[in-house]
């Protein structure tokens, strides 16, 4: 969007910049694959194409089944989209008020249209909470209800999950597997690898300030603007563990909070 809501502006790019970034992905010589392709490699050793790259989109904003999907399809770029069902169909989640702030969103009925553009659909919970702060019943509800809602709409299994804002823990990863997901992506601000963990696959976030040169650096498996980019897998840092503990204590007082 050219004029996104303030709360999501940092993670939004203009249509012009998006087109230039996609052109950079095409020009770099990498082969885009959906998350399912990477997961088959991680779980079963399926051979990946040379120099693969995975493009993912979270939440389900209104541009996704329109100009975003069209821009991807025009360049024959497959991708994976993770949808927050409570934001797309609030009537299907009574009593589970979505925590996403207001923004133009696609509808749940448009999920099938994404697949027509070559976009794989995954789940992104019902309300977009910090999953690693929830009680076990709340966690299971977020994981299972979003999965079943999407499966009802699409008529087939939805096997892939994205943790809202990447927040996860060992218990969250076990719950994702128990809910029937074959994989889950986190954030980690790192490159993934052929040795990555299927239930916390690393991703890099594109921010509004990133340039085409930054994208080109990532495609070369280098850091943007000279920054050092880690390669997963690696253990959580003490800072990550401390931040998780703080958020859990805060959630006991305030209740579930938006992951963002």
Image (tube, rainbow, N blue to C red):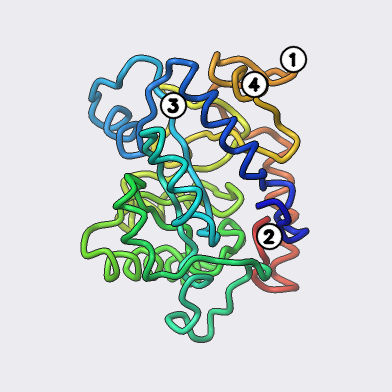
**Marking on residue 229:** 4
The first of marks 3 and 1 along the sequence is 3
The first of marks 3 and 4 along the sequence is 3
Q: Nearer the viewer, mark 2 or mark 3?
A: 3
Q: Give the spatial CA distance, label 3 vs label 4.
A: 16 Å
As rendered, which of 58 and 199 lies closer to the eye? 58
Whether residue 61 sits left or right of residue 10 in the image: it is left
Q: Give the spatial CA distance, label 4 vs label 1.
A: 9 Å
Q: Nearer the viewer, mark 4 or mark 2?
A: 4
Q: Are marks 4 and 1 in contact (CB under 8 Å)?
A: no
Q: Give the spatial CA distance, label 3 vs label 1.
A: 21 Å
Label 3: element kind: strand
Q: Give the spatial CA distance, label 2 vs label 3.
A: 34 Å
The residue that label 1 is drawn on is: 226
Label 2: element kind: helix
Position of residue 124 measured from the top left corner of the image (x, y, whole percent): 47, 58
The residue that label 2 is drawn on is: 248
Can you tell which quarter of the image residue 30 is in?
A: top left
x 46%, y 84%: residue: 91
Label 1: element kind: helix
Label 4: element kind: loop
Position of residue 96 measured from the top left corner of the image (x, y, whole percent): 53, 79
């Amino acid at each position: 969007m050219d004029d996104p809501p303030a709360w999501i502006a940092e993670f939004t790019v203009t249509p012009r910049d998006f087109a230039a970034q996609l052109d950079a992905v095409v020009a770099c010589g990498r082969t885009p694959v959906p998350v399912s392709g990477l997961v088959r490699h991680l779980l079963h050793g399926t051979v990946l194409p040379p120099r693969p790259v995975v493009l993912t989109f979270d939440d389900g904003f209104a541009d996704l089944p329109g100009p975003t999907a069209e821009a991807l399809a025009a360049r024959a770029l497959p991708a994976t989209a993770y949808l927050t069902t409570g934001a797309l169909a609030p009537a299907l989640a009574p009593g589970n008020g979505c925590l996403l702030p207001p923004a133009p969103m696609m509808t749940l009925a448009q999920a099938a249209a994404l697949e027509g553009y070559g976009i794989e659909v995954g789940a992104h919970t019902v309300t977009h909470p910090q999953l690693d702060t929830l009680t076990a019943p709340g966690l299971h509800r977020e994981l299972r209800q979003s999965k079943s809602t999407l499966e009802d709409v699409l008529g087939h299994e939805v096997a892939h999950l994205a943790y809202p804002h990447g927040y996860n823990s060992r218990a969250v990863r076990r719950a994702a597997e128990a809910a029937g997901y074959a994989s889950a992506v986190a954030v980690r601000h790192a490159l993934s690898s052929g040795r990555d963990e299927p239930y916390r696959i690393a991703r890099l976030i594109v921010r509004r300030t990133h340039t085409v040169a930054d994208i080109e650096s990532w495609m070369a498996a280098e850091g943007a603007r000279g920054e050092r980019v880690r390669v997963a897998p690696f253990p959580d840092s003490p800072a990550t563990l401390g931040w998780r503990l703080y958020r859990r204590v805060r959630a006991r007082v305030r209740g579930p909070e938006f992951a963002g």
